[in-house]
Image: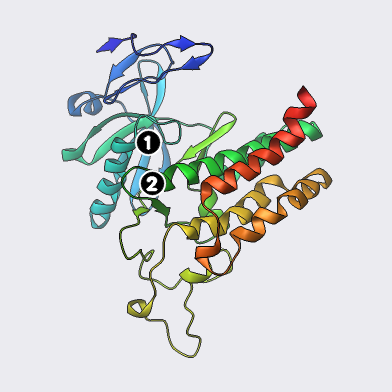
Amino acid sequence: MFFNSFILLFFGAVIPCPKGYFSLNSIDCHSLLKCNEIKSLSLGDLVGFGAVKQIYKSSWNGFSVAVIFVNNVEYLNDFHHGLNLLIDLNPSKYVPILIGYCKENHVYVTKYYPLGSLIGFSNYVPENILENLKYRFKLCLNYIEIINYIHSLKDVPLVMCDTNTLNKTLEQYLLDDDKIILNDIDALTPVKSGGIICGKREITGHFAAPEQRWSYKERSFNHSLMKHYDEKTDIWKIPHVCSHLLGDAKAAVSVKFHLFPINKKCLQNDSFSRPRASEVLLYYKSIYNDIFIKDEL
C-alpha cells in the first residue's frame, strides 16, 4: 500500500512517514512488509555474518534492501530484542529504515547501506584539507547526537553495551552518505533502577569506562561482585571515538585543543562528574560553528 500524504517538503525539510510505514525515496510511504511479502524476496549475496545475525542483500521495487535472519537459536532473545527496539524506534533518522518483519520466521528487512560500517569512514573523506576536517567533525557530531538520542528516550536511557574497544564501537554504526546511523542495536541495554552490567565477562582496557573494569586487582574476576553503572559509560568513550574520527592532521590537532575542556570532563573517573550527552553535544557544536559556520558568513 502506497500513499504520499505524509511525506511533505517544507522549506527543504522532510516529514517522515507515520508509524508502521517506510519510505526509500522521500516521496512515497509504504506499509511495512508482512511475512508473505518478505518470503517472496530473492536473496542475493551474504553481506554480513555474526553470532546473532546473518544478512543478505536483496531487492524490493528496484531498491537494495538487507534481509536479516537469526543466525543462532541460542541468541534468539538477543535477535528479537534488537528487532523490537528497531520497531519501537522507527521511524528515526538515527536507526536503519525498517522495511518489514516476520517475527514467527525470525527475519526482518531494512534499507541496505552500501558504504558499510563507520570503521571504513576514511575511504570516503574529501581530499581538500578543510572539507576533510569538516567531514570528520560532522561524523563526530553525528555520533554524539546518536548517544544523546539513546540517552534521552522517554522511557529509560539506553546504553551501548557492545562497545568495549574502538573498533567494536565503530562497527556499531553505518555510514549513510555524509552521516551515520546506529547499526547493531541488539546490545542496546535499558538502564533501569539500580543500573546495569554489560555482559558477564570481564571488560579490560582503557577504552572502557573505569566503572566497567574489575577494580579488585588482588582477586580473580567475579561477575557477582561487579558494581552496577549507567549511561555515563558512553560519555567516557566520546573523546576516544571523536579523536579517532578527527584524525591526526595539523588542523585536527588544533580542533582537539579547543575540545580539551569538555573531553576532560568526559574522562572523569567518577561517572557522576561526567556531563550529560546533551552538554557534550552543545560544546562540540559550538566549536564546530566557530570553525566552519562563521567562515561561511
Percent x, y of residue 277: 52, 49
Q: Is residue 233 above or below residue 249?
A: below
The disc labelled 1 sits on which kind of residue?
Tyr
Instruction: Identify the mark at residue 127; answer none if there is no mark.
Output: none
Q: Residue at x 24, y 58 (%)?
A: 74
Whether 118 is drawn above or below 230: the answer is above
Q: Is residue 150 above or below residue 191?
A: above
Horizontally, residue 133 falls left or right of residue 202, namely right
Asked which secondary structure carries label 1, the reply is strand
Q: The N terminus appears in which quarter of the rendering? A: top left
Residue found at the very far left of the displayed protein: 104
Q: Mark 1 highlights which residue?
A: 56
Residue under the image location 41 percent in, 81 percent down: 221
Instruction: Give left or right: position of 51 versus 136.
Output: left
Residue 277 vs residue 199, the one in the foreground? 277
Compare residues 267 and 242 and report the one nearer the observer. Answer: 267
In the image, what residue type sits under mark 2? Ile
Residue 144 seen in render: yes
Badge 2, how many Cα within 10 Å: few under 14, some, many 20+? many
As helix, strand or loop, the secondary structure at mark 2 comes to loop
Picture quarter containing residue 121? top right
Q: Where residue 99 appears, x then y in whole percent?
A: 32, 27
